[in-house]
Image (cartoon, rainbow, N blue to C red):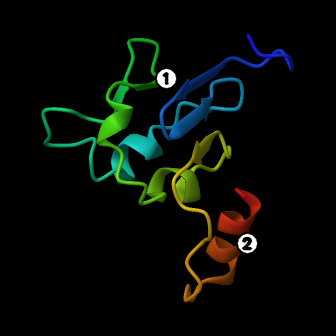
Amino acid sequence: MSAEGVDRVDRDKIELDLGRCMACGECLDVCPRSSDTDYPVFRRTEMGMPELLYPESCISCMECAVRCRAMALRVEGLYLPPFNLKDPQITRKIYSLY
């Protein structure tokens, strides 16, 4: 438990806030390194929650963090968001992660 009383999993580049997570599974669906690979970044637990399995497999594409409706994921490794995004809603969400 963190100081705020929220369970957090911090491993390498990814921070998963289990207190905010809605267990929708979208992070698993959009992660290019969580399907059809021997070392997936995420997997779904028996309780339906995402779990960081091999965070070192993360390529910092930020798909999981951008798509997370609960804003429960933060990906480290990129210091500035991409500048040429065409969707302003996605741009705002990316900037809110920093």
Where residue 97 sits, quadrant-wise, is bottom right
Mark 1 residue element: loop
2 or 1: mark nearer the eye: 2
Where residue 38 sits, quadrant-wise, is top left
Work out which quarter of the rendered image holds the C terminus and state it: bottom right
Question: Residue 40: x percent and y percent?
Answer: 26, 35
Give the residue at x 13% y 42%: 36
Amino acid type of the residue that numbered disc 2 sits on in the rendered structure: Arg
Where residue 82 sits, quadrant-wise, is bottom right
Q: Viewer-proximal residue, 88 or 76? A: 76
Mark 2 residue element: helix
Q: Residue 49 carries which label?
A: 1
Question: Residue 74: x percent and y percent?
Answer: 61, 45
Give the residue at x 35% y 47%: 29
Question: Residue 89: x percent and y percent?
Answer: 68, 75
Placement of 2 over or under 55, stated as above or below: above
Characterize the local packing of mark 2: few (<14), some (14-19) or many (20 or more) Cα atoms within 10 angstroms: few
Amino acid type of the residue that numbered disc 1 sits on in the rendered structure: Met
Give the residue at x 77% y 16%: 2
Earlier sequence position, callout 2 versus callout 1 = 1
Residue named by callout 2: 92
Give the residue at x 14% y 40%: 37
Work out which quarter of the rendered image holds the N terminus and state it: top right
Q: Which mark is residue 69?
A: none
Q: Does the CB distance between marks 2 and 1 fall below 8 Å? A: no
